[in-house]
Image (tube, grey):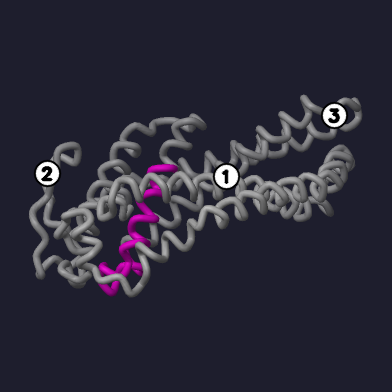
Amino acid sequence: VLGEFLPAKHVKRIQRTINKLRRAAGRVRDWDVLAVELGNIRDQAPPSEQLAIDHLLDQYRHRRAAGLEKLTRRVRRIERKDFWDWVAKHYSAHLPIEEVRAAKEDERSLGQLAIEKIRQELEIFERASQSYRTGDVEQLHLLRLAVKRFRYVLEVFAGCLGPNFRSGIYQPVARWQESLGAINDAHEFSLRFDQLAKEATEDEIVRSLIAVRDRYTQQLEQAAWQFREGWSEGERNQVAREIRSALGITGVDPATANGPPPTDSNPLVANPDSD
């Protein structure tokens, strides 16, 4: 989000390093999430699913340990390259803002960048909303990504937004992401159990894994239906109108809007010229 403020070489190094770290941590977290989910359903699961649940909970300890070992190696590799010292050197809290701007020759304030970024992500969200017409999982996935990006850019610039931000336009955006996240979780669990069933060699375990897969397939269908029922075009348009009105770009085509320069009277940004 803040990459436009930073030198391109810095952005590339930071993104490359953090993405590798995120992927390694994500593999460990995936097993943690699965273990928590299996623990939640274990007591209520029918006998047909119990074997698969016990089988995976037994595997969990070994697979998590292997993932954690890889994550530890990744962390140590980053430390050997002095990545964190390099970040502290260039982006210490004590670094004068003038030095950051000089490196990029960018005179925009954080408040001005907030207006630009929020507008950009709003346009992406609107296009994804207009493209969504059915309960197709791929369309739901693309919509989820757009909503997530939109929510996070609002959170990043929360300090620049007005006092009613979290009680107003933020609430439906957060609700949309949570609903779409539940759909994605069910989809991912369904795919994972399908793959585990293909990898298993014992017929009894295969049948049990398929039973658990079917549970999440049904959960996916139910979650997708609930989302479609609550996906109000009127509410989406209201959120977009409020944000566009606050940014001063009402009545402009979202695909081509550039927006006016920020002003002190802009109600969305508490102080557009703040650093």
| Residue 72 or residue 260, whichever sits in front | 72
Residue under the point 28% across and 51% down: 7
Q: What secondary structure is marked by label 1?
A: helix
Check residue 206 for magenta coloring.
Answer: no
Q: Mark 2 belongs to which amino acid?
A: Val
Give the residues drawn in magenta, as a range.
Answer: 145-168
Numbered badge on residue 23? 1
Q: Is residue 174 above or below residue 223?
A: below
Mark found first going from the N terminus, 2 or 3 = 3
| Residue 72 or residue 242, whichever sits in front | 72
Q: Magenta: predominant secondary structure element?
A: helix
- Say if mark 1 contacts mark 3, CB within 8 Å: no
Quadrant where the C terminus is found in the figure = bottom left
| Residue 141 or residue 158, whichever sits in front | 158
Q: What secondary structure is marked by label 2?
A: loop
Instruction: Give how far across and how far down residue 57 sits, in percent.
Output: 83, 48
Q: How many neighbours does mark 1 have within 10 angstroms: few (below 14), some (14-19), or many (20 or more)?
A: few
Residue under the point 39% across and 61% down: 171
Mark found first going from the N terminus, 1 or 2 = 1
Residue under the point 28% across and 54% down: 6
What residue sits right under mark 3 in the picture? 207
Horizontally, is 237 left or right of 216 in the view?
left
What residue sits right under mark 2 in the picture? 252
Q: Mark 3 belongs to which amino acid?
A: Arg
Horizontally, is 2 left or right of 206 in the view?
left
Instruction: Give how far across and how far down residue 193 sits, in percent.
Output: 73, 34
Instruction: Give how far across and how far down residue 79 sits, in percent.
Output: 56, 57
Mark found first going from the N terminus, 1 or 3 = 1
Disc 1/disc 2 C-alpha distance (Å): 39 Å
Disc 1/disc 3 C-alpha distance (Å): 31 Å
Residue 242 visible in rendering: no
Q: Mark 1 belongs to which amino acid?
A: Arg
